[in-house]
Image (cartoon, helix red, strand yellow):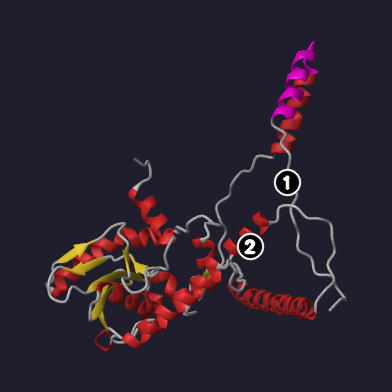
């Protein structure tokens, strides 16, 4: 007997496998995730990511599949929180959105794509889809043993297209091999993949080393080179920020007392608001209480309340480059 929800059980099952979406990151073709992100998820070192974009994707999924079913004239079997493993490589699996009820029982995956990202897609007849989605479909075709897979894609919220991708067994072999090697090295042997710059990785590093020993390490050549690269990148960012500010000021100067330039930029005042100066408010409140005749009991109450609501602030571990050492 378990109190876990179907979604919690599904997430736990996914954590024990390499999923279709993980494969794109492992192959280095995912625009959103890295190998480090996959490793953190599998090791349970970070919370499961669930962005607003992902939540809206789930809400629109059924509507997209409904539109696809009507357009293609094919009944679909819909899935929710169902994980299907490979019979060839048990570590590999996929969570299908849907599958044809008849015919070749191909998997169908629903995607909601913003209009600005539509240029990454080819003509629907060509089956030319972004590499990360192609990798995802390759795994889905493998676990279902289907000859093809469809992407039901809603572009800009108002244009539904069907992309068909044919099965490629050579790509499957590459995926199967790399999945096995990746799992052995990074999960079984517990060797972290290369670092990335994601917020989740930064949070994990901070939580892993909450205390320091005070020891100062001797630098390696690689570490000196990395520090030099950081300084170089920071200088480039500073230059870019200065250039951005200059260009913005050029437009602001042109806008002047107007509110913007049609189709180019706007420069408007936001709504006037009010902010409570909490420190000044509390100090004044304490002074008022102290001025009340015979207010000793109130003064003590104020001190007790201050003590009650004063909590220790954990130290922040700051990363600083030592100038002149590179």
Residue 64 position (above or below residue 139) = above
Is residue 92 within the magenta segment?
no
**Could you tell which of marks 2 and 1 lies nearer the N-terminus?**
2
Which mark is drawn over residue 314? 1
Q: Residue at x 42, y 68 (%)?
A: 18
Q: Nearer the viewer, residue 125 or 118?
A: 125
Residue 303 position (above or below residue 128) = above
Quarter of the figure that contains the C terminus: bottom right
Q: Residue at x 43, y 58 (%)?
A: 52
Q: Nearer the viewer, residue 321 or 15?
A: 15
Please name the residue that numbered disc 2 is placed on: 202
Residue range of the region highlighted in magenta in the rendering: 291-308
Q: Nearer the viewer, residue 98 or 156?
A: 98
Dot 2: within a 10 Å radius of its alpha carbon, few (fewer than 14), some, or many (20 or more) residues?
Answer: few
Q: Residue at x 58, y 49 (%)?
A: 272
Please, what secondary structure does the residue beneath circle 2 have? helix
Locate residue 46 relative to residue 291 in the image: left or right.
left
Quarter of the figure that contains the N terminus: top left
Quadrant of the image occupied by residue 130: bottom left
* Prevailing secondary structure class for the magenta stretch in the rendered image: helix
The image position of residue 187, as x and y in percent, is 53, 66
Is residue 297 within the magenta segment?
yes
The image position of residue 234, as x and y in percent, is 73, 75
Q: Nearer the viewer, residue 244 or 110?
A: 110
The image position of residue 66, as x and y in percent, is 19, 65
């Amino acid at each position: 007997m378990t109190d876990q929800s179907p979604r919690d059980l599904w997430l736990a099952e996914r954590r024990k496998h390499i999923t279709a979406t993980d494969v794109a990151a492992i192959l280095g073709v995912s625009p959103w995730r890295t190998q480090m992100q996959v490793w953190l998820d599998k090791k349970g070192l970070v919370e499961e990511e669930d962005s607003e974009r992902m939540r809206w994707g789930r809400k629109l999924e059924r509507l997209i599949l409904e539109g696809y079913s009507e357009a293609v004239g094919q009944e679909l079997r819909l899935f929710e929180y169902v994980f299907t493993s490979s019979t060839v490589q048990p570590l590999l699996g996929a969570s299908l959105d849907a599958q044809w009820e008849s015919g070749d029982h191909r998997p169908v995956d629903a995607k909601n794509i913003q209009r600005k990202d539509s240029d990454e897609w080819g003509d629907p007849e060509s089956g030319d889809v972004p590499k990360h989605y192609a990798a995802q479909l390759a795994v889905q075709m493998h676990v279902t043993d289907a000859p093809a897979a469809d992407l039901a894609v809603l572009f800009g919220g108002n244009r539904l297209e069907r992309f068909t991708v044919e099965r490629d067994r050579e790509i499957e072999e590459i995926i199967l091999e790399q999945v096995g090697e990746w799992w052995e090295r990074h999960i079984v042997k517990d060797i972290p993949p290369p670092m990335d710059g994601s917020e989740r990785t930064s949070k994990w590093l901070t939580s892993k080393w909450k205390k320091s020993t005070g020891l100062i390490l001797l630098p390696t050549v690689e570490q000196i080179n990395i520090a030099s690269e950081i300084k170089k990148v920071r200088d480039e960012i500073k230059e870019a920020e200065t250039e951005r500010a200059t260009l913005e000021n050029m437009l602001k100067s042109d806008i002047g007392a107007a509110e913007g330039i049609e189709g180019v930029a706007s420069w408007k005042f936001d709504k006037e608001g009010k902010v409570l100066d909490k420190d000044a408010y509390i100090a004044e409140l304490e002074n008022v209480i102290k001025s009340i005749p015979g207010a000793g009991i109130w003064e003590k109450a104020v001190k007790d309340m201050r003590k009650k609501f004063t909590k220790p602030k954990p130290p922040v571990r700051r990363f600083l480059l030592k100038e002149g050492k590179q």
